[in-house]
Image: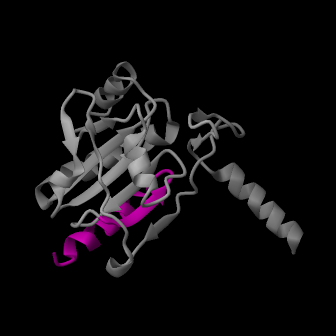
Amino acid sequence: MSRWRGAAAAVLALGLVGCAPSVSGGWTETGAEAGYVSGDRSVTTWEAGDRTGPVEIVGTDFAGEPVDVSDWRGDVVVLNTWYAQCPPCRAEAPDLVALAEDYADRGVHLLGINSTDDPGAAQPFERTFAIPYPSVHDADGAAVAALQGVVPVQAVPTTVVLDRQGKVAGRVLGLIDPSTLRSVVDELLAEEE
C-alpha cells in the first residue's frame, strides 16, 4: 500500500502547476518540465460562522492610486496573488477578467496582489490581459502578510474570496477553475447581509 501512496504523491507533485514561495520569501522556480511547483488547485470554503477576518488590505496600485479593501465592505471581494512571469497567473488572467466584467454590476470587486514585480513588469501584464481591476503593488509584502494572518497563502496564484463583511469565505491554491470560483461568488451573493 505504501508503494501506491508514494507513486500517487509523485504523480500529484508532477501534476501541480504554478509557482511556490521559497524559504527566503522570494519565489523559486523548481520542478520538472513546467519549471514550477504550486498549489494543488484545492478549494476550501468556510461556512459563515466559521469565517475569519475581516481582511484589512491597504496599499497603492500600479497606477499610483490608493486601494483600501474596507471601502468595499458590503460587497463580495475576490483577491488574487500574481506576478507577470507566473505561467498559471497568465493562464487564469482571462477568467478573472471575465469574472470582473460579468459581476461588476452585482457588487463584486476584484483586487490583484503583486509582491514580486515593479510597475515596469506589472503594467504590461495588465495591458496585455486588459485587466479592469486594480492590483496592489505589494513590494513590502504588507498585503500578503495581512492575508497570512487570516488565511494561509501558500502559492502564487492564490485566490481568496471575502464575504460582505470582509471575512474569508473561500480560497483556491493555484490555478482557478472559473466555474468553481463563480459558484463560490454566487453563493456569497445569495447570502443575506
Number of marks in picture: 0
The quarter of the picture where residue 121 lies is top left
Q: Quadrant of the N terminus?
A: bottom right
Counting from the top left corner in percent of width and height, residue 64 is at 21, 27
* Residue 186, percent from left and from top: 26, 69
Q: Quadrant of residue 74?
A: bottom left
User: Percent x, y for residue 96?
Assistant: 32, 48
Quarter in which the C terminus is drawn: bottom left
Q: Residue at x 37, y 35 (%)?
A: 138
| Residue shown at 83% from the left, 62% from the top | 6
23 with respect to 2 (left or right): left
- Is 88 in the magenta? no
Question: What residue is drawn where x is 36% and y is 28%?
Answer: 125
Indicate whether 87 appears above or below 40.
above
Q: Which residues are magenta?
A: 167-193
Q: How is the model colour-coded?
A: one colour
Say which quarter of the image contains residue 189: bottom left
The answer to which of 115 and 146 lies nearer the viewer is: 146
Residue 71, percent from left and from top: 15, 52
In the image: residue 183, left or right of residue 64:
right
Whether residue 191 is in magenta: the answer is yes
| Front residue of this view, candidates 167 and 104 | 167
